[in-house]
Image (cartoon, rainbow, N blue to C red):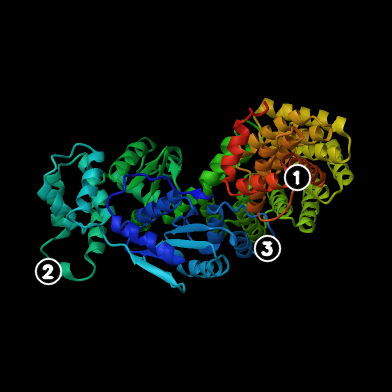
Amino acid sequence: MLSHLPESRDEFVGRHHELAAVAQALRQHRLVTLTGGGGVGKSRLALRAAEQVLREGSRGVAWADLWPLSNPRLLVATVADALDFADHSSTVPVDALCAWLVDKDVVLVLDSCEHLTEACRSLLDRLLGECPGLSVLATSREPLGVQGEHRAVVDPLPTATDAVELFRHRAAGSGPGGPWDPATTARLCEWLEGVPLALELVAGQLAHRTLDEVAHDLRSRLDITAPERTSGPPRHRALRTTIGWSHELCDPAERLLWARLSVFRGAVDADTVRAVCAGGALHEKDVEPALTGLERGSVVSRTGDRFRMLDTVREYGLMWLDELGETESLSERHARHFLERGHEAREGWLGPAQIDGYRWVAAAHADLCAALDHFLSTSPGRALDLSGRLALFWTCCGRLREATAYLEESLTLSEEQGPVRTRALWALGVARVLSGEHVAAQRLALACERQAVHQEDPEGVLHAAYLLGLVHLLRGGPMAARFVVDGALESAGGEPFGSAGRVLCRLVRVFALTAQGLREAARREAGELRADCVARGEWWTRSYADYQLALISLFEDRAGEAAGHARSMLDGKRRIGDSFGIALGLDLLASALAAQGAGEPAVAAYAAGENYWDAVGHPQRGTPELGPVRRQYESTARSLLGDDGYDRALHRSVLRDPESVLRELLDSSPPGS
């Protein structure tokens, strides 16, 4: 069952009636939209309501942050990612998403829709029309305008009760700032109209100011006695004034960092902040103290070692960045930094930095997309470079749609030649083959080969051979696959682990040997490849070497060895976040468990595998030789349990969270080393 929600940063205060009303609305309506001004608490109310649905245990819950998206192009991919749909299909993205969701019982939360209203309306029309088990809880400053939408207005907190409690709680976390005079606290909450963000910003000032000082200064800023106070929505002006006042109270370094931080789309660590934001009047040594000051003042929030800025506060920062005339230069600096980090991740792919690379690419997704968008409009050649370097990370970890879109646009807009273009052609081919588009992938492999030969690029030739060999394998042509990669390896020469291209071609060769029935050679070469990977701390190739060793062990009736290698493969794929590889590994582990006579665990593995295959959007089950193995041992598991017992076990397992099943299967025996 889906259960992906952001971590609750702070204690939730009040809103008991609103929570009950939202829960009731979700029972009666397919789309509930929480509306209200910026900073009023829509997201926190939605999060608490989603947590409540999850505790009830009857429905899955997924959360999609839309605030990092600068345009609608990544909306469907973001929603699919939130729903754990790692789309490997070749159909139109929204069609594939609808097909996958059609039988799911899920509450989807779309947070911060206001800047993508039209795109959200179009997507929800499709999803709600075709997926009867789907309900949507959205937050937006305005209604979305979807037929059947139920609007729930989120008001500020009651100033005499919940607002006071929230203020005291946040102020206590900011520092001494007391004593807490009840009358002064109540007046502050009334002046701030009970808007949670305004309350938190003011509470943040109590780290180094007394309550009376804050109240005196704020009263003059808000101009409490001015007659025009009654015109327009006062909470909007109170919030704007409070944000501006908080900005004025920052020291110059904090104000400059506030503006520059607004360039980030996602949460980032302090090293990234220094790399992008330091310079000019903001010295590198001043960044960390300024960041600490902004956190203390509730301008940024921190989860673990990563910082993010609330979208309402970020808007203010963007305005000041523009006033400073730094919008273009900071966008360029931001994009250049993520390009450099993309280079580092790709260069470290063959070694111990590989896992860190996968995790960094996943965490930096929103900012990588922002960098690509910047380069597409300013320097398509660099977009081509970055999108090609991300391919080994994105294509196996649920980012096929983004990879394909950025690669296609970059290849169209850029006239860049040489290894950069060869790599991009190869990357697009990998995306095509993993989507099941073998003919298109073969064309791209041949184009990649021509480009590499023309440019005298031996690594490009090896990558092209890997791609073409992979196409041959998936189409049932292991002899052709082996011929292609053997020729490329012989021409390239060099150390067997000397480059990514050599390692990829060695892997295709192992697959081809297994498919041809040359098991002794396949087992020997798979073992050598795996040992090389272990020695260098590489996991992606190692996992597929384990896949082959498990398959060969099953062919030779060594079920215990097969289970060990399958668990090792799954351990590696889980570290990387490779849903496609996990699906393959679960099929293998299920077969090995059935061969060992463990019927119930085998069925649990088969059911979890079905859920993972479902989540990649098409029934691709690896190379052809795995199919007969799976069918044979499914029959074995059924024989072990009987038809009724098998069906009952399958029904129980299909309804379970596949990630928890995977954890149990891996914990039941240590993975191979």
User: Tag 1, which secondary structure?
Assistant: helix
Nearer the observer: mark 3 or 2; the answer is 3
Rate crowding at label 1 as few (under 14), some (14 to 19) or many (20 or more) other CA atoms within 10 Å.
many
Counting from the top left corner in percent of width and height, residue 134 is at 52, 62
- Going by the numbered disc 2, the residue's amino acid type is Pro
Nearer the observer: mark 1 or 2; the answer is 2
User: Tag 2, which secondary structure?
Assistant: helix
Nearer the observer: mark 3 or 1; the answer is 3
Left or right, 282 with reference to 415? left
Query: What is the spatial separation of the Cα atoms under label 3 and label 2, in whole angstroms?
Result: 60 Å
Counting from the top left corner in percent of width and height, residue 15 is at 29, 55
For disc 2, the marked residue is: 227
Q: Quadrant of the C terminus?
A: top right
Mark 1 or mark 3, which is nearer the start of the sequence?
3
User: Tag 3, which secondary structure?
Assistant: loop
The answer to whether 445 is drawn above or below residue 206 in the figure is below
**Disc number placed over residue 91 in the picture, else none:** 3
The answer to whether 530 is drawn above or below residue 610 in the figure is above
For disc 1, the marked residue is: 460
Mark 1 and mark 2 residues within 8 Å of each other at the beta carbon: no
Mark 2 or mark 3, which is nearer the start of the sequence?
3
- Going by the numbered disc 3, the residue's amino acid type is Thr
Rate crowding at label 3 as few (under 14), some (14 to 19) or many (20 or more) other CA atoms within 10 Å.
few
